[in-house]
Amino acid sequence: MKLLEGKTSIVTGAARGIGAAVALKLAQHGSNIAFSYVSDSSADKANALVEELTACGVTAKAYKSNAGDYAACESFVNDVLQDFGTVDVCVNNAGISKDNLLLRMTAEQWQDVMGINLNSVFNMTKQIIRPMMKAKKGSIINMSSIIGVRGNAGQSSYAASKAGVIGFTKSVAHELGSRNIRCNAIAPGFIETDMTHYLKDGDAATDFLKKIPLGRFGKAEEIADVTLFLASDMSSYITGQVLSACGGLNI
């Protein structure tokens, strides 16, 4: 049974990692996929992902677009609507980390993280709500982090941006619930991706694993499963929630 047959989903920052896993999972369940990537160096991965998605029997297209830029998001969503006709699901996944102790953090590092992790969610949601309101349906899924829930030393900018995503998610859920538009957040724990590769070896990995009741890092596919649930009608009575997928780190 395909849970998203005939629907169209946007996924930002999907050339690799969690975003690529999410795009593939949604495609496997029948959704057409429009996804963004930001750098020229990701073009080959984006093109390879398009081939993988279309092999699932859906329509897929990659767009070079910076989710942290408001005008770029406006153009991106307009292009998707022109190419696909509608958008049923929007997964705001684009994100970066520039970890540093607050004492050493520069204003530029702070702004860079906020610009991508938090501003991008506003930029995309602002553009996507009009077609969803017209259709009187939609699911918006914002990728937060368990660090946005509990904080972590050396990650004040990342934690603040991801906590902001949670507050934004809850507010949008209040605003759009009457229009049958749901908005939820996912708070992944430590997931095996390029962003967390430095945590996998040595003392750092041992320390983190001790804090995780399930005793392992998560996989991008496991976050994709949670995203599928929130994108589909299986979660039709869920909005304004933060679903932690962290192996029990937040117990």
Image (cartoon, rainbow, N blue to C red):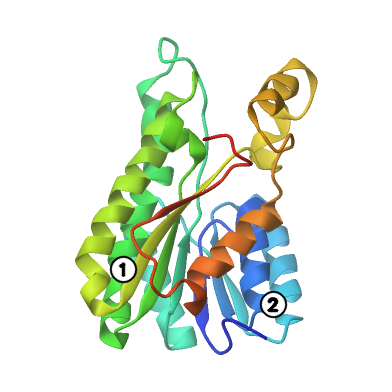
Can residue 158 be seen here? The reply is no
Q: Quadrant of the N terminus?
A: bottom right
Residue type at mark 1 is Gln
Residue at 41% x, 9% y is: 103
Q: CA distance from mark 1 to mark 2?
A: 26 Å
Disc 2 marks a residue whose amino acid type is Gln
The circle on residue 127 is 1
- On the picture, is 143 further left or further right than 206? left
Question: Which quadrant of the view contains residue 185?
Answer: bottom left
Q: Which residue is mark 2?
A: 28
Q: Quadrant of residue 74?
A: bottom left
Viewer-closest of 50 and 141: 141
Q: Residue farthest to the top?
A: 103
Structural crowding at the residue carrying mark 1, measured as other residues with C-alpha within 10 Å and reported as few (<14), some (14–19) or many (≥20):
some
Residue 173: x, y in percent? 28, 62
Q: Secondary structure at mark 1?
A: helix
Question: Which-is-in-front pick, marks 1 and 2?
Answer: 2
